[in-house]
Image: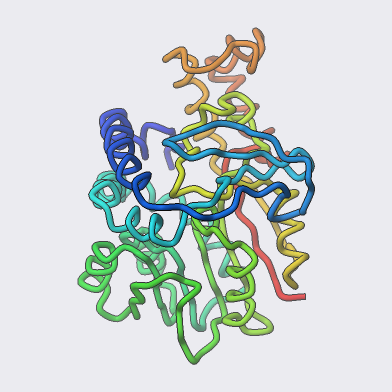
Amino acid sequence: MKKLEFNDIHTQKKQKKLREMMIKTVSRLAELKNDNPVLDSCPICPSTKIEFFVNAYQFDISSCLDCGLLFCNPYPTKEQINAYYNSEMKSFENEFFRDSFEKRINIFLPRIELIQKYKSHGKLLDVGSAIGIFIEALHRASCSFDLACCDMSEEACRELGERYPDVKILNQDYLDMDVDSQFDVITLWDTIEHIVDSKAMLQKTHHLLKDDGIFVFSTPNTDSFEWICAREKHVQILPPGHVNLMNYKCIDILLRNNSFRIAEAFTLNSSLDISYVKKIIEKNEVDRSAIGNFLWQEVFDPDFERVLEEYLMNKKKAGNIVVVARKM
């Protein structure tokens, strides 16, 4: 299988258009009143060592100096979030996913193998399903799960319902989801960074998960090679979509404080990190001092790149972390 590179799933044309639409969308969101307080302590650890990190798309991002959490401060309101997820920009983002659908399937194949190591059947709830790339990967892998999907985008849910009539589709906020049954597996792929109230999200997950079930999720890893290089210019700084950006330390604290424990954690697809760093070097979008003269040159050497890929995965320093958690 050909290794994944950043431009495989984020084409240059789409990235440019997405940024343009993002600017238009958030200018409208800024007109909506936000009475949420500016926090003076971390919502996860909760340290008072908080400092300003960057302003992105008219939202201030703060950094916790103890656990490393990056978070919107103040957080966007529910009205702003609902407007964002049903905006023209989100429709375009769904098109963005359609164009890279096949290549994104490959991201989920090792994740499905990981799930099947723990559970081979039962009820599976996927939260933040978007247009259903993970659901398609499950179908192609001939998995025998009884599937349900939850997403806030009306357009994405319509598409999911048309493509997968056998899957239960829930077009609502996960925290408002009202179902009677519990699940053997709950997945949130690149979704927890979108949820303002992480504690409420975990309480909801704990309630919906069977005692012997598994909670499996992925999220950007801010303690990674690509984040060290890109810093406040990182492409994943996308409020009000991304409101909490984490690393292993924050995740461990958050889970333990909410009656979960980490069973396993991995950072996969380090080729995406390296190709992203190469891209920002070539486009002169990164400070050379953030990378160092040696890496600035050697990251383009194929032999060095192979060694670096292995190192980043082994040391959990790739840009996306996958976690398997269980109830305590």
- Quadrant of the rendering where the N terminus is positioned: top left
Judge from the rendering whether residue 222 lies leftward or rightward of residue 253; answer left or right. left
The quarter holding residue 232 reads top right
Residue 124 x/y as whole percent: 49, 77
Which residue is at a point 52% across and 15% down the rendered structure image? 300
Coloring basis for residues: rainbow
Of residues 157 and 314, the one drawn nearer to the viewer in this rendering? 157
Which residue is at a point 54% across and 62% down the rendered structure image? 113
- Quadrant of the rendering where the C terminus is positioned: bottom right
Relative to 268, does residue 303 appear above or below in the rendering?
A: above
Which residue is at a point 75% across and 73% down the rendered structure image? 259
Relative to 144, does residue 285 appear above or below in the rendering?
A: above
What is the residue that sits farthest to the bottom in this orientation? Answer: 180
Of residues 23 and 247, the one drawn nearer to the viewer in this rendering? 23
Residue 306 x/y as whole percent: 59, 27
Of residues 240 and 192, the one drawn nearer to the viewer in this rendering? 240
Of residues 169 and 172, the one drawn nearer to the viewer in this rendering? 172
Q: How many marks?
A: 0
Relative to 176, does residue 23 appear above or below in the rendering?
A: above
Residue 21 x/y as whole percent: 27, 38
Judge from the rendering whether residue 137 lies leftward or rightward of residue 162; answer left or right. right
Judge from the rendering whether residue 305 lies leftward or rightward of residue 107; answer left or right. right
Residue 139 x/y as whole percent: 36, 69
Which residue is at a point 27% across and 66% down the rendered structure image? 154
